[in-house]
Image: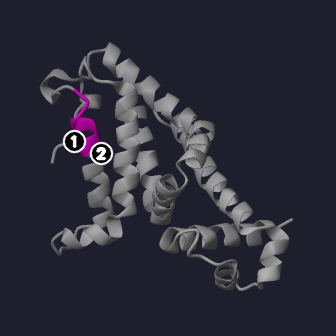
């Protein structure tokens, strides 16, 4: 069994290379070399390339689901929707290869990814829906909003945007503004603007941030 350090290094290297080259375009030799070990040593820890792929996906989605309970324990009730949104955005911004890998795998192996989303991410969706249902019952959310569909689009917006961020960021004008923070702020504004009622009719905690 892999020691924690070697296992973490192998998972990180595989995530990076699978995201950049795809599963088929990445060799076990390349992953082993990225960690500084030989291919037989990698196969000692992960019996096959497919086993490594599954471990990478399980690790990615399990980590996504783990960040929310910790954050929600520390957040005040009125701040929890913002907390859920920010936690998801930051999770993928911290390592954009997570988003790139998830997009690749969703396109290449949709059934496999669907099963993992059911297992790992549905608890996150339940948290987000509960926050939105509470806001809707208080009149802060548009009454005709389909909350479940909104959460799906929210995931698509965040993951898809971050997956191509390093390429499309070239379209932004040059400047001193932190591009990561700029993206995070705009994603949050877009996510909230399409769901919550105009700020004049909404309590302060649900207002869309001023531009």
**Residue occupying the point 45% across, 57% down:** 103
| x, y percent for residue 196 | 24, 28
**Residue occupying the point 58% across, 68% down:** 23
Total marks shown come to 2
85 on left or right of 48: left
2 or 1: mark nearer the eye: 2
Helix or strand or loop: what does disc 1 sit on? loop
Residue 137, relative to residue 204: is it above or below?
above
Residue 164, relative to residue 64: is it above or below?
below
Q: Can you say which quadrant of the picture contains the N terminus? A: bottom right
Residue 158, relative to residue 162: is it above or below?
above
Which residue is label 2 attached to? 188
111 on left or right of 89: right
Residue 192 counted in the magenta span = yes
The magenta stretch spans which residues? Answer: 189-196
Helix or strand or loop: what does disc 2 sit on? helix
């Amino acid at each position: 069994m892999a020691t924690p350090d070697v296992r973490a290094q192998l998972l990180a290297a595989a995530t990076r290379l699978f995201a950049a080259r795809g599963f088929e375009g990445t060799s076990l030799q390349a992953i082993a070399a990225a960690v500084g070990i030989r291919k037989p040593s990698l196969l000692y820890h992960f019996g096959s390339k497919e086993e490594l792929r599954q471990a990478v996906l399980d690790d990615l989605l399990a980590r996504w689901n783990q960040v929310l309970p910790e954050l929600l324990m520390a957040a005040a009730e009125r701040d929890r929707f913002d907390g859920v949104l920010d936690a998801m955005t930051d999770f993928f911004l911290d390592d954009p290869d997570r988003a790139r890998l998830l997009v690749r795998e969703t396109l290449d192996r949709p059934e496999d990814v669907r099963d993992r989303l059911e297992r790992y991410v549905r608890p996150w969706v339940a948290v987000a829906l509960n926050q939105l249902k509470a806001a809707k019952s208080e009149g802060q959310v548009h009454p005709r909003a389909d909350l479940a569909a909104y959460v799906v689009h929210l995931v698509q917006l965040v993951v898809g945007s971050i997956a191509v961020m390093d390429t499309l960021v070239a379209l932004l004008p040059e400047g001193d503004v932190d591009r990561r923070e700029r993206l995070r702020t705009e994603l949050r504004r877009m996510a909230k603007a399409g769901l919550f009622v105009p700020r004049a009719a909404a309590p302060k905690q649900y207002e869309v941030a001023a531009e």
